Amino acid sequence: QVQLVESGGGLVQAGGSLRLSCAASGSIFSFNAMGWYRHFLGKQPELVASITSGGSTNYADSVKGRFTISRDNTKNTLSLQMNSLKPEDTAVYYCAARATLFGDYDYWGQGTQVTVSS
């Protein structure tokens, strides 16, 4: 059972940057898809960005051009570089992984809080 642990959240002013990291307890080589979700209070979790084992990426319209997802199979890590942060990016961010290319994510981290002040 692979465990995912996020880090890098915190408080930042609008326009600033943060880099989230997700460390896996085992190899992520077998994960065909990994992604970052965020959860706003009272709303459904939103898929922020995803990346396949082949490196194909997908982003929510709200973060395109500002966020960059990447994975390092040698270090078993998933990252999310967040630039030009806005107060509406404030949420709990979760990393997720699945073995299949499509479908539900099977593995989830515990989440890390990102707060953007105006």
Image (tube, rainbow, N blue to C red):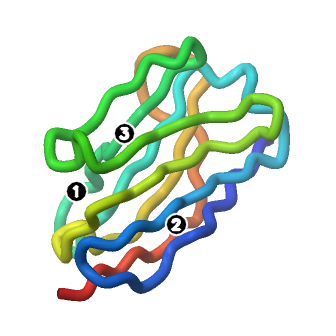
Q: Is residue 57 above or below residue 65?
A: above
- The amino acid at mark 2 is Gly
Q: Nearer the viewer, mark 3 or mark 1?
A: 3
For the residues bearing labels 2 and 1, Cβ distance under 8 angstroms: no
- Residue for badge 1: 44
Q: Is residue 56 above or below residue 115?
A: above
- In the image, 30 versus 64, the foreground residue is 64
Horizontal side of 101 relative to 48 (left or right) equals right
- In the image, 65 versus 113, the foreground residue is 65
- The amino acid at mark 3 is Ala
* Residue located 34% across and 81% down the image: 115
* Residue located 23% across and 48% down the image: 63
Residue 78 lies in what quarter of the image? top right
- Residue for badge 3: 49
* Residue located 22% across and 56% down the image: 44
* Residue located 40% across and 67% down the image: 17
- Name the spot of residue 97 as percent of width and height, x first: 57, 36
Helix, strand or loop at label 1? It is loop
How far separated are the C-alphas under marks 2 and 3? 15 Å
- Name the spot of residue 2 as percent of width and height, x first: 77, 43
- Residue for badge 2: 111
Between disc 3 and disc 1, whose residue precedes?
1
- The amino acid at mark 1 is Gln
How far separated are the C-alphas under marks 2 and 1? 15 Å
Between disc 2 and disc 3, whose residue precedes?
3
Q: Is residue 117 above or below residue 91?
A: below
